[in-house]
Image (spheres, helix red, strand yellow):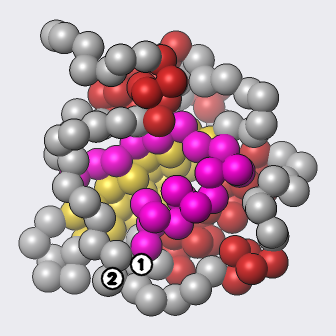
């Protein structure tokens, strides 16, 4: 297997050239939190950040959202959020996988490996995401 990523930073962003673009027309609702939190950096915990992402995803039609509540019994590095949404035409399912990190926290090697593998699955977009990346979260989930 060849490494398609130029750097660890590119891998962490989940850059992938083999995934389908998400359909932004599925839901036009606006997220209340986007206007409430100016820059989405006011989270005290990663759990608050994840909960905000989950709320936003639900508002935009993501019907299947998985979050491991106790990772001590899970595969090392498994991603924080796995979300699925059927397209409007029900032809295929879109997927977004997120590894959530607070400012200054770095993903583990195992977490980066999971993100890289998720990005090889057609229709899945996987990223390491931080509160400062809220614009990208909106792009991924609209």
Q: Residue at x 22, y 40 (%)?
A: 17
Asked if the magenta segment contains residue 140, the reply would be: yes
At label 2, counting other C-alpha atoms closer than 10 Å, the crowd grade (few under 14, some 14-19, many 20 or more) is some
Q: Name the residue tied to disc 2.
A: 26
Give yes or no for contact between labels 2 and 1 (Cβ–Cβ under 8 Å): yes
Percent x, y of residue 110: 49, 17
Q: State the residue lying farthest toward the front.
A: 6
Q: Is residue 106 visible?
A: yes
Q: Which residues are magenta?
A: 123-142
Q: Residue at x 63, y 58 (%)?
A: 134
The answer to which of 105 and 8 lies nearer the viewer is 8
| Count of numbered circles on the image | 2
Q: Secondary structure at mark 2?
A: loop
Percent x, y of residue 140: 43, 60
Asked if the magenta segment contains residue 128, the reply would be: yes
Above or below, 14 against 69 in this view is above
Q: Name the residue tied to disc 1.
A: 61
Task: Give the quadrant of residue 38.
Answer: bottom right
Percent x, y of residue 57: 51, 69
Q: Is residue 68 visible?
A: no
At label 1, counting other C-alpha atoms closer than 10 Å, the crowd grade (few under 14, some 14-19, many 20 or more) is some
The answer to which of 80 and 24 lies nearer the viewer is 24
The answer to which of 76 and 103 lies nearer the viewer is 103
Asked whether, in this view, residue 113 is left or right of residue 18, the answer is right
Above or below, 84 against 56 in this view is above
Quadrant where the C terminus is found in the figure:
bottom left
Q: Secondary structure at mark 1?
A: loop
Q: Measure how far apart labels 2 and 1 are at the Cα level.
A: 7 Å
Percent x, y of residue 88: 22, 82
């Amino acid at each position: 297997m060849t490494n398609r990523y130029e750097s660890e930073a590119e891998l962490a962003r989940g850059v992938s050239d083999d995934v389908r673009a998400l359909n932004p027309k599925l839901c036009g609702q606006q997220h209340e939190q986007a206007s409430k939190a100016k820059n989405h950096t006011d989270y005290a915990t990663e759990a608050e950040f994840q909960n905000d992402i989950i709320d936003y995803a639900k508002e935009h039609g993501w019907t299947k959202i998985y979050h491991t509540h106790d990772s001590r019994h899970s595969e090392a590095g498994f991603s924080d959020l796995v979300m699925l949404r059927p397209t409007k035409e029900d032809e295929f399912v879109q997927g977004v996988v997120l590894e959530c990190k607070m400012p200054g926290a770095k993903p583990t090697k195992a977490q980066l490996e999971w993100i890289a593998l998720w990005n090889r699955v057609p229709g899945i977009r996987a990223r390491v995401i931080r509160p400062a990346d809220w614009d990208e979260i909106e792009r991924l989930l609209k």
